[in-house]
Image (cartoon, grey):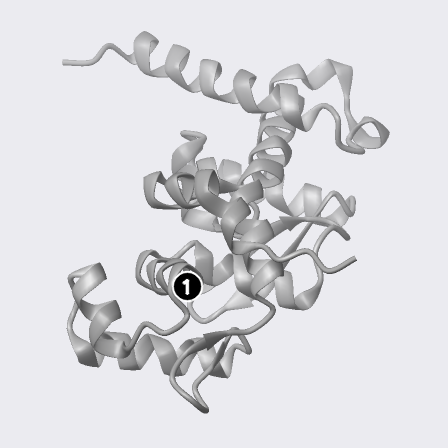
Amino acid sequence: MVERSEVDENKRATLRRFAVLGAATPLAKFRDDGESGESEARDAIAGYVATTPGAHFSKVRDDLKLGTGEAQHHLRQLLEAGVVESRRDGDYRRFYPAEQFSSFEQVALGYLRRDTPRGMLVELLRDPSATGSDLADALDVSRPTVSKYAADLEDAGLLDREDGYAVRNPETVITLLVRYADSFGETAATFAAEADGFISFDP
């Protein structure tokens, strides 16, 4: 059985790790030195959102080991202070550092936070000629699943299905994948290591 003190210390260690990153955000204007615990939690959320843009509420709460009310309280303060901003994505509300991403980038980050759409985009960036069947085999999902997500990605402006499948604004998508690879998992990290071969430079 895990002791309560051990749980609390794990939470504090997690908050401290992300609070170091969050301390660089414009939080000083409403930080209250008399509430260091609250400041640390807000800093941690700001740091987490900076390194994991597009994360939805439950992921922010769970990864930082916060209670639902606690996370809601601090996110509301960060939103009101203009430190973070949010975007509705279906059933989710996703969070981003304020004024850092275009609408397209926010949408792209939201889909890159989903396993199957991210896998599809990575496979298509690796092999633009990949078919729906190729994607289904590579990702170990059904062909109808690929079709469903392809339609979603097209509606979101991330995929063109006019002649096969083609990622729209591929260099922007690659940049996001590389910049936040660690927060997307092993497949993205592997892709990031190979990314130089997928970016063309035309001076």
Q: Would you place residue 165 above or below residue 22 in this image? A: below
At x 20%, y 76%, the residue is: 133
Residue 53: image location, x then y, percent? 57, 47
Residue 124: image location, x then y, percent? 39, 66
Give the side of residue 150 with respect to residue 105, left or right.
left
Which of the two residues, 109 or 67, is positioned nearer the viewer here? 109
Residue 160: image location, x then y, percent? 49, 82
Camera sees residue 87: no
Q: Would you place residue 148 above or below residue 50 in this image? A: below
The amino acid type of the residue labelled 1 equals Leu
* Disc 1: CA contacts within 10 A as few (<14), some (14-19) or many (>=20): many
Camera sees residue 177: yes
Give the side of residue 53 with respect to residue 114, left or right.
right
Residue underneath mark 1: 121
Q: Would you place residue 96 above or below residue 24 in this image? A: below
At x 74%, y 50%, the residue is: 100
At x 46%, y 14%, the residue is: 13
Q: How many marks?
A: 1
Q: Quadrant of the N terminus?
A: top left
Q: Which image quarter: residue 140?
A: bottom left
Which SS class for mark 1?
A: helix
